[in-house]
Image (tube, rainbow, N blue to C red):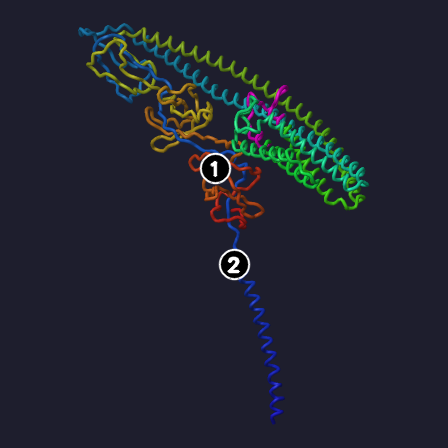
Amino acid sequence: MQKNMSVQGKQINVPMAGALILFAIVAAVAVGCNKQNATKAIAPDPVTVTVQTAQDRFSIAYSLDFPAMITAGQEAKVVAKTNGTLSAADFKVGQSVSLGDHLFKIDDVNGSAPISGFSAYQIKQAQLAAQQAFTSYQMAVTSYNNLVITSAKDLKQAEIAKNQALTGKTNLSQTTADSLKSAQLAYDTAKIATEQANLAYENRKAISNKSATDTATNAGLSAKTAVDSCSSILTSLVNTLDIDRDRGGIQTYSNTLGMADPSVRLMGRAAYEAAKAAIDAYRLNPPAATPDQITSALDIASKTKALADASKKILDNTPQSAALPMTSMAGVSLNSLQSAVAGYQTQANALVTQLTNVQQGVTNTGLNNDATLDGLQKAYELAKQQERSAAQNLENLKSSIKAQIDSADFGAQAADNQYASTQSKLDTQLAVSKSQADLAGIQYQNALTALNNLVDMHESIAPISGVITKKYADNGATVSAGQVIAVIDTTDDIKIQFFIDQSHLDAVRPGLGITVKNSDGQQASGTILAVTPQADAVTKRFLVEAKTIGDAKADLTLGTIATVTLPLIKIAPQGSLLLPLSAVDIGQNGASIFVMDSEKAKKVDIKIGRIEGETAEVIVQLPEDAKIIVDGNKLVQDGDTVKVAR
């Protein structure tokens, strides 16, 4: 009975064990699925950002508002021609009058009435002649002003084309000169490398059968030679760059060295003192053992290399000047100093490499000489191949540069000829148009004089058609000859006058489009007519005159204040970008921005220059196609995944 129960128990327990195993498997799978779901759930979504390329931030367009006065293009003052009492002055401010309209008369002081000395027919004919002359004069002036604007635009375009061609030629000369120097330097370096490789191979072949004593002797000689070379480099840098001084020196250009960043001079002097101290220590107490000689010489070469690198930074931060021009056919130039320092860098690098190889050779004297010779043989063959390649590249570059310079010369000469031709043609057109306007003005004055001659000196008429804007006396007032009684402004030719600061003078020129807004918020388009070349003695600002385009001038009332909006463009300084302040992060460790690099946010350290309004000059070196995050940067950290907003 007990046995059956045991058997029976086993029959029952087997399926229970299988169920437990099945449950464990299901639970494990469920846990695994939950882990996968949990991992997917916590993966952050990419942050949506807005980007702009570095090229887009080289310049920004913005606008400035200036208060302006609406004035008349033509204004006439009506004066008393004799002494007496003003009468018949029934006109009012704001009243429209036509040329020849009667304005007032002046009674004699004794009360006698003026004697009329003209006929209505003569007056009518004289008024018609004066009106026609005035219309012709206005048309001539308008034509001249329009020609001034269009001429300025045409001449500016020709000047821009000429400057662009000249700049392209200059830039090409500079870039090709640098490229040619680089190619020549690469070739010279390849020749030196070939010679050094050959020398190393021959030396190794000669000493392969010598003893460790010979190896030590040659190694010591190499160390001494390297120290002498480093000493020569040191002396040359002291003589040409005054590297042993913080300021001043024996050279005329000493005070300009490293002017852009004074700290580089301190770094250079520190590097000089370190190299000099190492050389002096070597000369004062030369190491006895060969390994120690090599170690000391390698230290001297490394410090000499650091000095050459520091000298390059000094020259990189040195501006050209009269004492130290960029290039010079005779005498010292910035380019020649940079080339010399580049040679010292190459020489120092070669010394470091050579001493390192010597040190390795002393350490590994027991290595297989055949293997070493085989490696040196291959290095020599490679150096010869590189030398041939560098020579071919140099010749190809010379041919290409000559073709480019010839093309740039032709383009610059053509643009200069076009500018001269345009200027001559426009000067002639302006002179003719100005003469026509002056002649029309003289004819108008003659016609007006003829009209006034028909009128008794006690009578006064309107010299132009327009609106009465000022009235200085009323009926019954005693007036004197020459006293201004009224002012008439034309309404069909208005001007907008405003003042600008000197900082905006270069950006404002005739022909520049503007927007004018009156007190009711109505807008009109306009254009700049002229900018005074001399500032106001009191305000130190420059007067600008503009006019409206089309019929929008009807919405502008004489004597009222309007708002002029100027569209301007700000160019970033060299090596800087113009970014909104919101795109810049400022923390305890400095300022930074984020760029988008392969769908990742990358933090870039920057320096902040001048800040104007909501825009900052950011000093940073980035490729033109670098994508700068300008919106959403506050939501990302370095390395976060980002995507561009659509």
Earlier in the chain: of badge 1 and badge 2, it is 2
The answer to whether one can see residue 583 in this image is no
Q: Residue at x 58, y 77 (%)?
A: 20
On the image, numbered disc 2 is attached to which residue?
A: 42
- Please say if 120 is above or below 165: above
The answer to whether one can see residue 159 in this image is yes
The image quadrant that residue 548 belongs to is top left
Residue 485 is a magenta residue: no
Secondary structure mostly seen in magenta is loop
Q: Amino acid at mark 2?
A: Ile
Residue 327 is a magenta residue: yes
Answer left or right for 481 relative to 204.
left
Q: Residue furthest left?
A: 110
Which contiguous range is marked in magenta? 312-337
Answer left or right for 23 relative to 461.
right
The disc label shown at residue 608, or none: 1
Q: Residues within 10 Å of mark 2 (few under 14, many from 20)?
A: few
The image quadrant that residue 87 belongs to is top left
